[in-house]
């Protein structure tokens, strides 16, 4: 099973990805937890350039994230799925659709096509979208990167973008209210997965 977590910066995705990994491990499942941008040597380099490098245009951002994702799928995600592991990924295609496709205006269809091309069409089985009031999410951050510094205006756009994606892909994207305690949210994630399997 390929599960991804999405949400605005500071929505608690990484915590939930880790809690789900721990619960899979407790069930005796073989699981790979990974993240984007990152997950490979190239991905970490892209992460550094996009998050801390020069100001760049939306297509430069979209194609760099896509390059990182292509490598990530080829080196990590697909091999893990093929050997029967579950894969949990903190951010994946929907981050590009929300940030570059909608918030930065490139268009969902164009960015989706790019990503389907570079990943051999690999979409998650389930995507958990953690929804928070955008102001709350920004307030949680201590060490902002370049995108986070663009601040609440971008975060509000991204929040709206994710909600739009959830309506567009209702079979795949499960929305979760992320205002509660991490353990409560983790329980809801597990229940949703149980209901779907
Ligand atoms: P990161 O530090 O991982 O943020 P978070 O902890 O919130 O996940 O930084 C990732 C940033 O990159 C985040 O602002 C979202 C952005 N991003 C995109 O714009 N497009 C993408 O395809 C991906 C994977 C991330």
Image: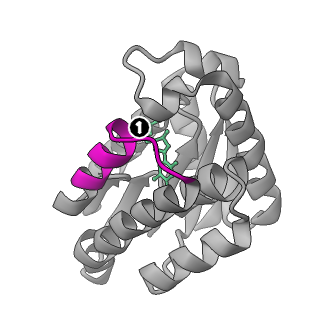
Residue 18 sits in quarter: top left
Q: Is mark 1 within 8 Å of ligand 1?
A: yes
Q: Which secondary structure type mostly characterizes the magenta part of the structure?
A: helix
Residue at left offset 68%, top offset 53%: 174
Q: Camera-side residue: 178 or 91?
A: 91
Q: How many marks?
A: 1
Determine whether 128 is above or below 18 in the image: below
Assign the C terminus to one quadrant of the image. Answer: bottom right
Residue 48: percent from left, percent from top: 27, 44
> Which stretch appears magenta?
45-57
Please state if 137 lies on the left or on the right of 14 as rendered.
Answer: right
Q: Which residue is mark 1?
A: 14
Residue 183 makes an appearance in the image = no
Residue 50: percent from left, percent from top: 38, 47
SS label for mark 1: helix
Which residue is situated farthest in the left direction here?
A: 41
Q: Residues within 10 Å of mark 1 (few under 14, many from 20)?
A: many
Residue at left offset 57%, top offset 32%: 185
Residue at left offset 68%, top offset 28%: 132
Residue 15 sits in quarter: top left
Residue 44: percent from left, percent from top: 23, 51
Assign the N terminus to one quadrant of the image. Answer: bottom left
Residue at left offset 72%, top offset 55%: 105
Please state if 163 lies on the left or on the right of 29 as rendered.
Answer: right
Q: Is residue 29 magenta?
A: no
Q: Camera-side residue: 35 or 153?
A: 153
Residue 54 makes an appearance in the image = yes
Determine whether 82 is above or below 181 in the image: below
Determine whether 150 is above or below 188 in the image: above
> Which colour scheme appears in the figure?
one colour
Residue 169: percent from left, percent from top: 75, 66
């Amino acid at each position: 099973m390929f599960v991804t977590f999405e949400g605005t910066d500071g929505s608690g995705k990484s915590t939930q990805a880790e809690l789900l990994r721990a619960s899979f491990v407790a069930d005796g499942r073989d699981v790979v937890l990974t993240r984007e941008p990152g997950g490979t040597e190239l991905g970490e380099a892209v992460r550094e350039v996009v998050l801390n490098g020069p100001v760049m245009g939306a297509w430069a951002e979209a194609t760099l994230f896509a390059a990182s994702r292509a490598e990530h799928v080829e080196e990590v995600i697909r091999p893990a799925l093929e050997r029967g592991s579950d894969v949990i990924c903190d951010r994946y295609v929907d981050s590009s659709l929300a940030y570059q496709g909608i918030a930065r205006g490139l268009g969902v269809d164009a960015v989706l096509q790019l990503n389907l091309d570079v990943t051999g069409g690999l979409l998650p089985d389930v995507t958990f979208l953690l929804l928070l009031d955008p102001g709350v999410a920004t307030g949680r951050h201590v060490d902002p990167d370049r995108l986070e510094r663009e601040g609440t205006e971008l975060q509000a756009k991204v929040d709206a973008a994710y909600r739009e994606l959830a309506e567009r892909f209702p079979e795949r994207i499960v929305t979760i209210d992320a205002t509660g305690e991490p353990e409560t949210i983790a329980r809801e994630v597990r229940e949703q997965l149980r209901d779907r399997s």
